[in-house]
Image (cartoon, grey):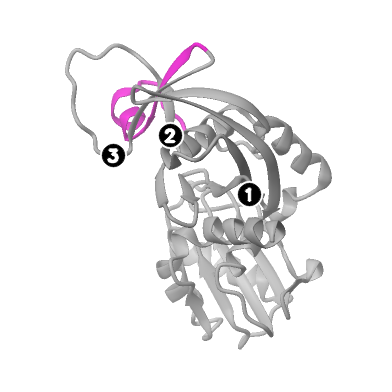
Amino acid sequence: MSAIIGLDIGRSYVKSYTGSKIFHFPAIIGEWRERKLITDYGENAIECRFNDERFFVGTLAQNESDFCRNMMTENKSHDDARLLALISIHKAALSENITVVTGLPVAQHNELNKKELQDLLIGYWEIEVNGILRNFHISNVKVAVEGGAAFWSSPKDGLIRVIDGGSKTINYVTMINRRYVDRESGSLPFGFGTNKSDNHKELANRIAGEVSKKWGDHDEVWVVGGCARELTGLLQPYFPNAKPLQNPLYANAIGYYRIGKSVES
């Protein structure tokens, strides 16, 4: 039996849940260099070596790399996503045989993109993080839908709407009696990290304007993501039954894990 990890590889943070461990770190990667002055930037300061390259990651990249980045490409199947996933598995200290459950935005959730992400992650890997070398095998990758996965962190019957406020996209998902409704779900091509303006009130107004084309004013709306509580307050004038889901930062990661456990059983 393989170990399962729910991995929410966000543009701002990577969130992980294994059933017994839950943690996150900034999704920032930068170049490595030898430091003369060693400062402790906390538990999310990561120095790693992978495929004979060395990197600063997390708060270490944020503070010490000249060319640090949050990768905001539309396609999530790239080397940075793999590196962040492998670091998460290393930090989780899982067994050698691992099932990863992760997700893609609604707009990107098709067989081609899912296969690209699976091909990126499946394999035998060796990575050193903060001086500790680990080897493990990712034998299986399941790709769910961002936002929709959060529903499975606390599922219930009836009509449930989910808004997942991310840095790159806003995913909105409709569930009726635990089934996805595609025609009332989608991705909005903006997020908290894509705009020249930092006006969250207007961002929420735009979200409400788009989803209200299909959703009713008094529907039950669950809001997830790192800004869930702020976003909920801004959406409530339009959707008074909007509420932040419990543990909104980790809702997708927890949902991914529970999807993996349900398939396993």
What amino acid is found at the position of numbered circle 2 in the picture?
A: Ile
Tell which circle, 2 or 3, labels the residue nearer the N-terminal end: 2
Left or right: where 137 falls relative to 64: right
Residue type at mark 1 is Val
Say which element carries label 2: loop
Helix, strand or loop status at disc 3: loop
Q: CA distance from mark 2 to mark 3?
A: 14 Å
Give the mark toward the camera: 2 or 1.
1
Q: Is residue 122 above or below residue 217?
A: above
Q: Which mark is residue 40?
A: none
The residue labelled by disc 3 is 43
Between marks 2 and 1, how big is the CA–CA gap? 21 Å
Residue named by callout 1: 101
Magenta-colored span: 52-69
Q: Which residue of the protein is positioned furthest toward the front in this rendering?
A: 1
Badge count: 3
* Label 3 Cα crowd, 10 Å radius (few <14 / some 14-19 / many 20+): few
View extreme (bottom): residue = 218
Q: Quadrant of residue 74?
A: top right
In the picture shown, does residue 207 fall above or below 21? below
Q: Quadrant of the C terminus?
A: bottom right
- As displayed, is residue 103 above or below residue 245? above
Numbered badge on residue 28: 2
The structure residue drawn at horizontal position 70% and vertical position 37%, both measured from the top left corner, is 117
Of labels 1 and 3, earlier in sequence is 3
Q: From the viewer's perspective, is residue 200 above or below residue 38?
A: below
Q: Position of residue 260 (x, y in %)?
A: 65, 55
Identify the residue at horizontal 73%, vertical 81% (top origin): 177
